[in-house]
Image: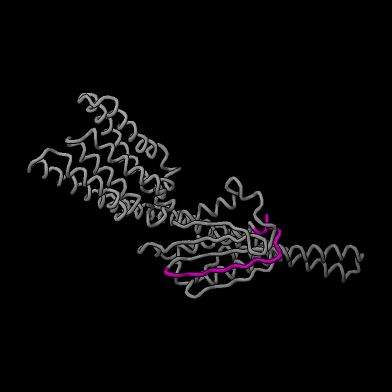
Amino acid sequence: MSPPHAMDALTQRAIGPAVRLLCQIRLVILAFALVLALLDGAGWFGVFLVLLAAPFSFVPALNWESRGRVYARNGILLAADTAVAVVALLPLAGSPLMAVYAAATAALWGLFAGLWLALVMAAPLCLYQLTAYDDGWRGLLTGVAGASLTIIMAWTGTQLGRRMRRQAILSAELAVARADQAALAERLRLARDLHDTVAGDLAGLALTAHGLADRLDREGAARGTVEVARGLSGAVRTVHEHTRRALGELRDDHDGVAGLVTEIARRWTGRTGIPAAVDLGPGVDGAAAERRMSHVRALMTELLENVRKHADASRVEIAVTAEDGVVELVVADDGVGLGPRASGGGRYGMRGVRERAELCGGYATWAPGPDGGTVVRVVLPREPAGVGQRPVAEVA
């Protein structure tokens, strides 16, 4: 028994506070159950049942942030929690706390397992409540009310989990939008400053150096002196060209993913001399909204820089595809392969790629290439409706 969909890191973080709260509620009720077990003479058996159930609430409340996805997708743990939840109801039999514990448990399952799996897991709790109260209409109605509350709380937990994840996505998108807006403003400021100062000064210096070399040549200066002057002129001209290229990179704003990725690959090849072939699938421009473009830019730049620094590759192949709003970036090189840099979470570049992908609700994987080298695959899921738009002059 396992959830129909694997939990991503964003969902794990989003529902963490609610998971901890529901686990704490279950622990409080188990404390009451312990007291009831001792008062009712259940003895060590009742105490054993409570102590058996406590770790299934204490451990997730303690380390959900680091282990939540393991708990949510492990079928054995989910089945064990279902069995232990029924066992925990035994010391509470006939008490109103039984319905509260079952409701909190169903809501907890709904948070991370989804509605249908939560209902399947909650079925034993409902059946036990229907038979746990005293005989007669009063007991039957109480059991029906408890079972109904359990079902309702499973649905409530599912809806709460969806809304918390949606809120986390919106918060992350807003934070990224603010950061990107600040980055754009800083890029434009730097571009203006460079254009008004450094670029202009270099243009004048290039003309002066060129004129100096020509004058020395006309006046019959020593050949070595003329060559030095012409070398100086060429160096200044090269620096001026690099500065203008940097200004273009600070100000550029492509209309779609295709143009952006192609331009990044072209510039990277120009700097490194390593050929980078780009394969673009249909519909990639429409799959990423304007603000998602900043993530694509950062991911492609970081991936190519990792190749330059560590791969010792002679060729790079880049593929960008889109299907149902999901954008997939694949960068494959023919270099030395992963080696020790994949251990311990990888270098900072790998961590940065992984963290940015998870910020978008996606993921990144590294694998050996079929003929050597490394294949990096980054998947960015469909953007939520309404968060893909941005004001004019926001993120480049």
Q: Is residue 96 visible?
A: yes
For the magenta stretch, what is the residue range?
Answer: 307-324
Q: Which residue corresponds to the image point at 59% horizontal and 67% vertical from the top-left?
A: 318
Q: Residue 356, position in %: x, y?
A: 50, 54
- Apparent side of residue 230 relative to residue 356 in the rendered image (left or right): right
Work out whether 210 lies above or below 311. below
Q: Examine the rendering and report whether any part of residue 390 can be seen.
A: no
Q: Residue furthest left?
A: 137
Q: Horizontal and vertical percent for residue 167?
A: 34, 53
Q: Quadrant of residue 388?
A: bottom left
Name the foreground residue: 260 vs 308.
308
Residue beneath the point at 30% across and 49% down: 121
Along the horizontal axis of the image, is 352 left or right of 312? left
Residue 379 pos. (x, y %): 49, 61
Residue 203 appears in which quarter of the rendering?
Answer: bottom right
Q: Residue at x 57, y 57 (%)?
A: 190
Q: Is residue 21 magenta?
A: no
Q: With respect to residue 99, does 156 lie above or below?
A: below
